Amino acid sequence: MTQSKSMKQLSSQFFENNGPLKGINICVIGGGFVGLASAAGFAQFGHAVVCVEKDSRRLEQLMKGQLPFFEPELEELILRSIQAKRLSFTADLRQAIKGQRAIFITVGTPTGADGRTDLSALEEVTLSLSEVLEPDQIIVLKSTVPVGTGKHIESILSQNGRKNKPFAVVNNPEFLREGNAVNDFFRPQRIVIGGSVSEAVELVANIYKLGMSQPVPFVITNNETAEMIKYASNAFLAAKVGYVNELAGLCDLLGVNVLEVARAIGLDPRIGSEFLEPGPGWGGSCFHKDLKEFSGLAESKGYSLLITAAVLASNDRQHNLVVEKIKKLVGTLKGSKIGVLGLAFKANTSDVRESPAIAVVKNLLEQGAKVTAFDPKANGAAKEHLPALEIAESPYDTIRDSDCLVILTEWREFQLLDFKLIFETMRRPNIVDTRNLLTPELLSRFGFNYTGMGQT
Ligand code: NAD
């Protein structure tokens, strides 16, 4: 592969669509949230996709067209793609990459023991690829990877027999949100592609252009900048949520309504209205690990990301503030019965990784409370994290005879519960609504002691 076309030529706000595009052969390694949304999305674009998953239980489900977790619309998309014979699943990496043009890697990049990113899954895949890569195949890093990883992967491949054999490593970080992954895949706000081999970058851009029904801003850059963009984006988003959470805390003390404050400040386009909803703290598989990596990276260069470090500390405090709100209503936690609604880190997902609900429940259990919980989709995953947690069959079973109802995930169906009935079955009518999901005036009319976030 040559670097014939200048990267500047490729860089434009709207990537021009010049000429007919054809489906290409793609391999996606890793059948998780990102891998499956990408694999099914690319198949829907008209590409032929093979997805490699090493977990045998997960693979078995995927081969039957079953999604191993809850993500709206994704299972239907996978099934349609399998039926159209444009998507298949395998554990055999060697076979899977035969004849593919682009190999997307979407394996997990969790926090390691040293607080920095553990790249072992990615390195393992790279070593396997080094044995079987065909000439001119393009490796696309879709996993979130520390700045410098693209070059690191290139050097692993060069040191393991690929020297003087053409290959290219491109970064294409993913920005989808769980709970909205399918929509985000088909309607992204931008597509970031970083690499030094222009044909490889162009091919990755074409993979998207084939399926996009509307113009999408492309950011074409080098590997390191693409890697940095993903961390910069997540650190900013976490800071925004952290900020509104801190505002809510202060509003509680001053008797000011944070919702009115958030609405008003969000009307300023420099601030923007999204991500200004106070809650029990942000969660999910990405923010925590990405902010840790970002801070660690800065420190390794003798620099401090003071805001990022504060955002991490502020989020931990938020979990404690929720527990304090519960204590304020019930008195001592020891022996109290707490009914929890919501365990997923946000609505519309079954994912409990770094869920604030799990942190809060753990704290309650440690302080001697008896906790019963219910989540529409995340009961099984939560039980794996917290075996001591009692899971109820329904929201009403969770709340019956409890001293406090705590809402920790913003599932809309919790708004539709019969609160008159709930009032009658609770031991003490206390509600801590960490998502400001319910209407305080209505609940007060029933006789509840209601506490939201920043709404006292
Ligand atoms: P995940 O843990 O849900 O999925 C990873 C999958 O890869 C698992 O199914 C695992 O079994 C599989 N895997 C691991 N090693 C493998 C191997 N050698 N061969 C084949 N399969 C293998 O992870 P995820 O949430 O999809 O995240 C993947 C990456 O994308 C991470 O870097 C993450 O930071 C990033 N990301 C995630 C999200 C999100 O919302 N989940 C959003 C944007 C970016």
Image (tube, rainbow, N blue to C red):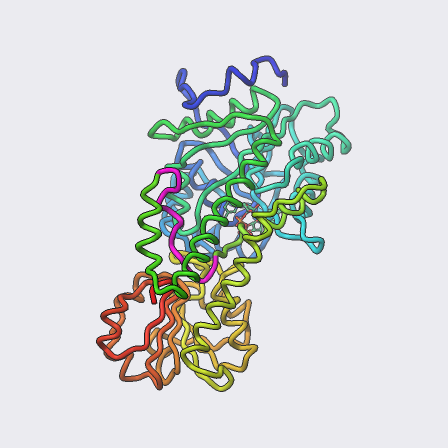
Q: Splitting the image into 4 quarters, where does residue 153 fall?
A: top right
* Quarter containing the N terminus: top right
User: In this picture, is 291 found above or below 166?
Assistant: below
Q: Please report the residue visible at 43 percent of the width from the left and 33 percent of the height from the top.
A: 190
Q: Nearer the viewer, residue 360 or 241?
A: 241
Left or right of 341? Residue 324 is right
Left or right of 366? Residue 296 is right
Q: Nearer the viewer, residue 456 or 153?
A: 456
Residue 280 lies within the magenta run: yes
Q: Nearer the viewer, residue 65 or 107?
A: 107
Q: Name the chief secondary structure element in magenta.
A: loop
User: In this picture, is 110 found above or below 2?
Assistant: below
User: In this picture, is 250 found above or below 148?
Assistant: below
User: In this picture, is 57 found above or below 424?
Assistant: above
* Quarter containing the C terminus: bottom left
Residue 8 rendering spot, x and y as whole percentages:
53, 17
Residue 349 rendering spot, x and y as whole percentages:
42, 56
> What residue occupies the far top of the structure in this picture?
4
Q: Please report the residue visible at 40 percent of the width from the left and 52 percent of the height from the top.
A: 179
Q: Splitting the image into 4 quarters, where does residue 22 fall?
A: top left
Residue 248 rendering spot, x and y as whole percentages:
41, 59
Residue 105 lies within the magenta run: no
Residue 211 in sight in this render: yes
Q: Please report the residue visible at 41 percent of the width from the left and 73 percent of the height from the top.
A: 340
Residue 290 in sight in this render: no
Q: Which residues are magenta?
A: 269-281
Residue 4 rendering spot, x and y as whole percentages:
60, 13
